[in-house]
Amino acid sequence: MNTKEKFFEISNPAEFLTLALEVFSHQYLQNQVYRRYVDARGVKPEDVTCLEEIPFLPIEFFKSQQVLCGEAPPQVVFTSSGTTGMERSHHLVSDISLYCHSLLNGFSHFYGSPEEVQFLSLTPTPEQNPDSSLVFMIQQLMDQSQSAENGYFLTSYPGLKERLLQRRSPGKKVILIGLAYALLDFAKTNPGDYSPLIVMETGGMKNQRRELIRDELHPLLCRGFGVDTIHSEYGMTEMLSQAYSMGQGLFSPVPWLKIMIRDINDPLAFVGIGKTGGINIIDLANQNSCSFIATQDMGCLREKDQFEVLGRFQTGDIRGCSQMFEG
């Protein structure tokens, strides 16, 4: 299958559907885990003609199975965050160039070239967390930026404050990317007017303290950093693409990423704009594992392909689907 670069050229729904069906057929043939799941659902690939008919693999499979196409060994294994003793997801990536191309093209789609940006990070460094897809993404953006003012500041709030107050590099935007809890800590302990600045939160309240909803968190961050709005990034270990919000919690996916909302009461059905349900993802960059994932996130679609993330299902709410595969 020669679709490695095709997904960057998608310009309309018909092209997305054509490529999605190609990827589905390829992954059914090459991914043993996904094929067994599709067979358990009683779906015949030759009968699938629309996105709604494609089976979405429950995301829990990434915790217990090797979700991978073919027999090529993975170049990188990304691991989800979690508390001690928690079973974590493992995403086996056999072609890391797909992730690099996806994240750089996706970022440029919304923010322009990374070369025009200075990146500051409130996340671990690559040395501290080498298995994190988020940290890998940030380092790739920094490498493209090549700004001498880039840096990681999770363990140095004074250093971040000094950097934010410095004269900015001529012609460069400044983006502070951070875990929600770290951004909140900094905003509370070092409040100030740091504009012009783009603050981008990536989630990450769980396991740290009470998880704040967006309507609670973002006003606190706006006041702490002296900005009018907070940007957000939506991604996960099991994906190779991102969606971005420029404010108000409305996310826009890259053209090769599609969000579909499944019915809470019938996980094999889908709901329309404005209806809350489970978030299903089609990530066409994820060609060598599984592009069709049923997540544990809840959300709803808005106009112009935008979507909101409204929280998470309680643990076990979608395990019923995965039990079809076990035994």
Image: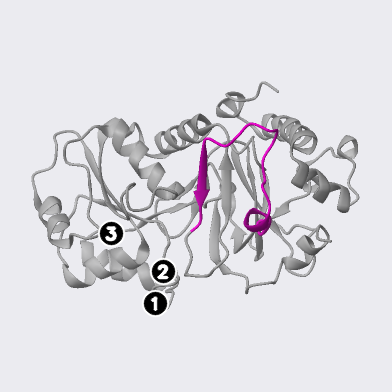
In terms of sequence position, does the residue under pointer 2 or pointer 3 come before the other? 2
Residue 218, above or below 304: below
Residue to which mark 2 is pinned = 205
Q: Which residue is mark 1?
A: 209
Residue nearest the viewer, comparing 188 with 148: 148
Check disc 1 and give the amino acid type: Arg
Tell me the CA gap for discs 1 and 2: 6 Å
Q: Is residue 315 magenta?
A: no
Query: Could you tell me what secondary structure mostly forms the magenta stretch?
Result: loop
Judged from this view, the residue extending furthest toward the bottom is 210
Which residue: 57% across, 51% down? Answer: 90
Image position, residue 295 (x, y; %): 63, 58
* Nearer mark to the viewer, of 2 and 3: 2
Answer yes or no: do the residues labelled 1 and 2 have beta carbons within 8 Å?
yes
> Identity of the amino acid at label 2?
Met
* Label 3 sits on residue: 228
Query: Looking at the figure, which quarter contains the C terminus?
Result: bottom right
Q: Secondary structure at mark 3?
A: loop
**Is 240 on the left-hand or right-hand side of 271?**
left
Q: Position of residue 135 (x, y in %)?
A: 38, 48
Q: Secondary structure at mark 1?
A: loop
Name the residue located 46 percent from the left edge and 47 percent from the top edge. 133
Q: What span is colored magenta in the figure?
A: 59-80
